[in-house]
Image (cartoon, helix red, strand yellow):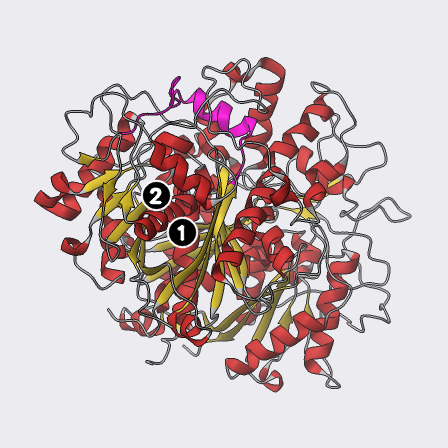
Amino acid sequence: MTHDSRVVITGIGSVSACGWTASDLHRGLLSGVSAITHPKNFDTSGQKTSVVGEVPPAPETVTQKIPEWASLSKSDRFAVAAAIEAVEQSRLSTDLWAAGLFFGGSTGGMFECEEFFGRLLKTRSGHPGIRLQASQQINSPGDAVARHFKLTGPVQTVSSACASGTLALGMALDELRSGQCDVVLAGGSDSLCLLTFSGFNSLRSVDSRPCRPFRADRQGLSVGEGAGVMVLETLEHARGRGAVPLAELLGAGASCDANHMTAPHPDGMGAAAAIQSAIIDACISADQVDFINAHGTGTLQNDISECRALHEVFGLRAASLPVTSNKATIGHLLGSAGAIEAVSTVLCLIHGVIHPMPDEGDVDGQMELDIVLGASRPIAPESVAISSSFAFGGANAALVIAGWKRGTVG
Amino acid sequence: MTPRPSVVVTGIGVVSAAGCGAAPFAEALASSDLVRSSVDRSAGYHRENSSRTAVLSGGADLSEWISPSKARRMGQPSKQAVAAANMAVAQSGLESNDLDRAAVVVATSYGAADVTENILRQAMLEGPDAVSPALFTESVANAPAAQVAIALKARGPNLTIVQRQAGPLIALAQGVSAIVSGKSSIALVGAVDEVNPLLHSILDRFRALARPDDDGIETARPFDHRRSGFLAGDGAAVIVLETEDAARGRGARPLVRVRMTGRAFDPFAPRTGWSHDHDLLSESLRKSLFTNGVDTIDIDRLVTGGCGIGPGDRIEALVLRSLFGDAPLPPVLAPKGVTGESGGGFLGAAVLATTGSPFGPTPGFTHEDPELGVIPHDGHSLPDPTAVLATGFAAGGAAAWAVLEPVEP
């Protein structure tokens, strides 16, 4: 398969439990210390577990850039802040008039919606003002970004649970290749809310400690919140304005297990199909992949299924291919997980290191994988990485991202 | 660059207030038979003077298309989507093996409203420990798309699009993209919505719903001078997309060709409404049609999202008037007058309109709005169309459109 256009990443932004910038994310992930802890502004009383990856309060340097701040939901704020950072880094003029936007999310303004509903049920005090519902819809964070930057191109949100962010980046790639747009913003945003935290706890899939993907004593995931946003453009467009890409989005793939609403296929068939599809789309071979930023939730079923998928795709190489998971540090950002993990993958490629997971617990003996624990690993700047997401309902998605040797464009 | 392959619709399934199947749905559109139901107000969510009716599909008998044992584990959107998908696939003549790489793309505005409300009620009234795990799995917006994939073993990309009234046509664009890019050979594209009392009461608090007439009846009145809001509506529609070559190669009869799709965004629209100025969307639509080689002179039918909400109908009308300039508008269909504000109803009506299915008079239209200058279809017999422009302008600024054409047998 060949493509008419190459697509490059020229700006990244993120909001996470590590802080309100991609630099904060990089530092946090490099530290090998989990940011998952007891929340200050999210009520976990009555829940089976009580640690989350909560975003700290926004610094003034962020809020002052967003005049509409007061009217936005939490997930809208994460989205707009991450997008501003990405656009600033891309050095695009703020006139993004013709650009499109592809976003992923799972609950939109559900946190504020819950406040409305609690007041309606009189379990919370206050008047159930309809303003609390204004950002309720799942497309609200993406729309908020489009409104902030005055985008007029295609704007759409995908909500395929935990694969949403990765699927959004894949849709953006297709759009740029099709020639419909030269520049798009793509990513995802989600905030902590009662619905998802109670739901995952009801499934008994949340670890009472910060999650430990691929470890023998793992007990489940940790729920997090935040956003990841990228500026994507055709290489031709980037060259035309003298921009230096940070990385190249080589390919995207998607599949569905079509097997079960919550459990991944035990053999990882669907996950493997998505990764293989992304590799084919990228016009590379599996041998060219240098490391994996895994979905790695820390649930018993996901991690073993993902391990099998990696062995299916990479064969004997799977045992020596470095594998990391950001969820051990920032939690599972659900609809925006794929977006922030793609941002993290770009950070690895820019800085020439693979982010480690906190070194807690022994690796599960069933996992014949080279799990990156405790300390970062050096990688070459032209390395190729897979970033993957696997969701409720069996939706699977994967991206192939390659480093960009600085100075080759411009 | 190789020419884009022709993508066609080879099957359609609909679940609506008129019942289960495309045939009763088509009959309802032909007769403008508006099936209103009273919305249950017993939970106390509604204000005293709120709207009271909606076009609800919950009573449709799905048993021919989904077994009760499977349906029991699903929320209404999932079971309706699966039933509609089974209908569409049956009409297409595809075998289950053909669907292995099929993409599933489903649009929804609010997802599983009832399940979500129930989880929150459990968590808030009884405590988080009371939340049912079975409910949680059905609360995710992609549950209908996932259940369709599970039911049909469709292992291609699985996407759920959430973009309000533009969602169904964005889903159509994504389905076409999946086929044109070669990532899937078949795409099941649909839209599904569910209206429950809580959602109905919230829409009413936004003053989005039709107010009662003097005789106490709530009518949507698309494009009418007296329009006061939409009727909330729910249901599901799913269509099967494949390349025309593949369809003809297996002896299937294509129903409709998707000539082009387009999307745009109006960043000046408020979060829950529409812009006053139509110029931006008018220019986007004009450019999109031109780029795809579509001349407005070729368009002889409009399937609008006109639903009776003041600023939404207004912007759509002004965009269409701008597109056609001094020329008279082709016949304007406003199916949401019958289906209520339902994505599935809109998608199903767009496909049926292209096949030449008759449409009755637009419910409630009696007074032309002089600013809009749109007189929707009055029910007279129309010749079969040659090109249908379907448009969806969402609250919040997103917009999508498609040009559909009938296909010669």
Q: Report the side of A247 relative to A333 (left or right).
A: left
Q: Which residues are magenta?
A: A190-213
Q: Can you tell which quarter of the image residue A57 is in? A: top right
Out of B356 and B190, give the one closest to the viewer.
B190
| Mark 1 residue element | helix
Residue under pointer 2: A389
Crowding near the residue tagged with mark 2, few <14, some 14–19, many ≥20 C-alpha atoms within 10 Å:
many
Out of B2 and A190, give the one closest to the viewer.
A190
Q: Is residue B237 visible?
A: no
CB of mark 2 within 8 Å of CB of mark 1? Answer: yes
- At which x and y percent is residue A23? 44, 44
Residue type of the residue flagged with mark 2: Ser
Q: Report the side of A188 relative to A373 (left or right).
A: right
The answer to if A209 sits in the magenta stretch is yes
Q: Residue at x 61, y 59 (%)?
A: A149
Q: Residue at x 34, y 81 (%)?
A: B1
- At which x and y percent is residue B279? 72, 73
Out of B88 and A87, give the one closest to the viewer.
A87
Q: Report the side of A27 relative to A400 (left or right).
A: right
Q: Quadrant of the C terminus of chain B?
A: bottom left
- At which x and y percent is residue B109? 58, 47
A78 in relation to B245, above or below: above
Q: Chain of mark 2?
A: A
Return the mark for residue B24.
Answer: none
- At which x and y percent is residue A200? 44, 25
A203 in relation to A133, above or below: above
The answer to if B314 sits in the magenta stretch is no
Q: CA distance from mark 2 to mark 1?
A: 9 Å
Residue under pointer 1: A167
Residue type of the residue flagged with mark 1: Leu
Q: Residue at x 37, y 39 (%)?
A: A391
